Image: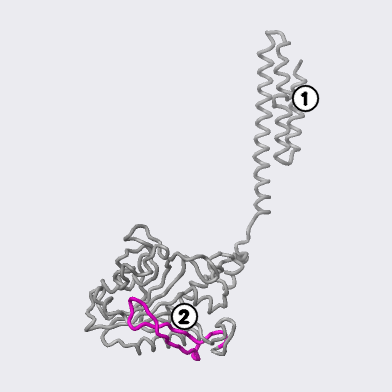
């Protein structure tokens, strides 16, 4: 073993390094000469065959050669890294002035669209939008609305109770009760929101649905004011040819009470499948605020009177958009929702 072997290794290693043109080749050269099975490593292992007096000097030469090769590899690696990085940046560059790819967005839910439209209508009529808790006290959900303890609406099969005094609100009327107990007349509000009842899920029923209720309390409020308000609302929602029809009904918190039908928006009163040939569609319930409700809420019924109404936003949405199955509004099927 002599210096000529080391010189040969040096020349071959440096030549291969200078000729290399990518990082993977540099790594192969490093393994070939300096790896566990590389040429220099093999020479170091064979030093045991040299005389003892020659080993230190020869070992020093081998280590110097290792440093030379490592230095050449390092310098070449840095140079190749810069070249490869520049090429990658040229290949991967992004022109920020180009129009971006269109990102798909969802659309407003039909119930949200209807709620916003109704809010705009009633705000234009001088109403304010009020809100209240969905977890409600029995006191506001029933008692202040003149619903006695033995009323069917208190049946456990109809309402979701947490305990005898706390439940998920069954309508948005408690918002009206809270407002009357904390505000003095004149009052003119609408109350949209989710409500909950123990209903089986089918094409026309859901345990979670949406309502919007309205309340007006002031001096001299009459049934004719209620009818006029609902007439304007119907015409703004479905068009100027829309008519309203009042039918006597019963609600504990209004007296007198009525159900309100509108001319069918599909056939304009001629009769079709949607209105079952009658030309009318039932839309909401309403009436004059029961004097007992005013009294319990701290308002003098001898000085003030009022009217209230309530409608289902889900039903309005189904009528407006021709949706035949209520469940479509809650299944979050993007094929359905993207139409809006």
Against 123, residue 27 (above or below) is: above
Q: Which quarter of the figure is the N terminus placed in? A: top right
Q: Position of residue 335 (x, y in %)?
A: 61, 67
* Local crowd size for mark 2, using a 10 Å CA cut-off: few (<14), some (14–19), many (≥20): some
Instruction: Identify the mark at residue 305; answer none if there is no mark.
Output: none
Which residue is at the front of the view, 297 or 156?
156
Residue 45 pos. (x, y %): 71, 17
In the picture of the structure, the residue carrying the numbered disc 2 is 283
Left or right, 158 with reference to 238: left
Label the magenta part by its dominant secondary structure: strand
Residue under the image location 30 percent in, 69 percent down: 143
The disc label shown at residue 8, or none: 1
**Residue 97 position within the rendered picture, expressed as x and y whole percent measured from the top left:** 60, 65
Disc 1 to disc 2, how far (Cα)?
A: 99 Å
The residue located at (36%, 77%) in the rendering is 251
Residue located 76% across and 34% down the image:
16
Quadrant housing residue 146? bottom left
Q: Quadrant of residue 326?
A: bottom right
Q: How is the image coloured?
A: one colour
Identify the element where label 1 is drawn: helix
Secondary structure under tag 2 reads strand
Q: Write down the region rendered in magenta.
A: 239-267
x%, y% of residue 119? 42, 77
Decide if residue 333 is on the left or right side of residue 7. Answer: left
Q: Above or below — where is 30 with respect to 137?
A: above
Mark 1: few, some, or many residues within 10 Å (few <14, many ≥20)? few
């Amino acid at each position: 073993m002599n210096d000529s072997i080391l010189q040969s290794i040096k020349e071959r290693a440096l030549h291969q390094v200078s000729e290399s043109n990518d990082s993977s080749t540099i790594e192969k050269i490093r393994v070939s000469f300096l790896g566990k099975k590389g040429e220099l490593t093999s020479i170091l292992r064979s030093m045991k065959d040299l005389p003892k007096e020659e080993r230190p000097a020869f070992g020093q030469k081998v280590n110097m050669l290792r440093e030379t090769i490592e230095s050449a590899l390092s310098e070449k690696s840095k140079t190749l890294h810069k070249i490869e990085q520049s090429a990658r940046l040229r290949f991967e560059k992004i022109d920020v002035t180009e129009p971006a790819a269109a990102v798909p967005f969802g659309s407003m839910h039909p119930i949200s669209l209807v709620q916003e439209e109704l809010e705009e209508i009633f705000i234009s009529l001088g109403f304010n939008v009020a809100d209240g808790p969905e977890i409600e006290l029995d006191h506001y959900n029933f008692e202040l609305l003149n619903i006695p303890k033995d009323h069917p609406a208190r049946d456990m099969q109809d309402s979701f109770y947490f305990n005898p005094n706390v439940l998920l609100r069954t309508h948005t009327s408690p918002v009206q009760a809270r407002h009357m107990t904390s505000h003095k007349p004149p009052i003119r509000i609408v109350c949209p929101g989710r409500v909950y009842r123990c209903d089986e899920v089918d094409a026309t029923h859901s345990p979670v649905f949406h309502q919007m209720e309205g309340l007006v309390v002031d001096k001299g409020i009459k049934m004719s004011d209620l009818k006029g308000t609902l007439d304007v609302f119907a015409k703004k929602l479905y068009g100027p040819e829309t008519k309203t029809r009042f039918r006597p009904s019963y609600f504990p918190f209004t007296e007198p009470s009525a159900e309100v039908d509108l001319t069918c928006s599909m056939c304009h009163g001629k009769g079709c499948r949607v209105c079952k040939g009658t030309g009318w569609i039932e839309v909401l319930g309403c009436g004059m605020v029961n004097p007992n409700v005013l009294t319990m809420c701290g308002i003098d019924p001898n000085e003030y009177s009022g009217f209230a109404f309530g409608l289902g936003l889900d039903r309005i949405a189904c009528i407006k958009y021709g949706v035949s199955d209520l469940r479509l509004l809650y299944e979050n099927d993007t094929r359905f929702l993207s139409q809006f």
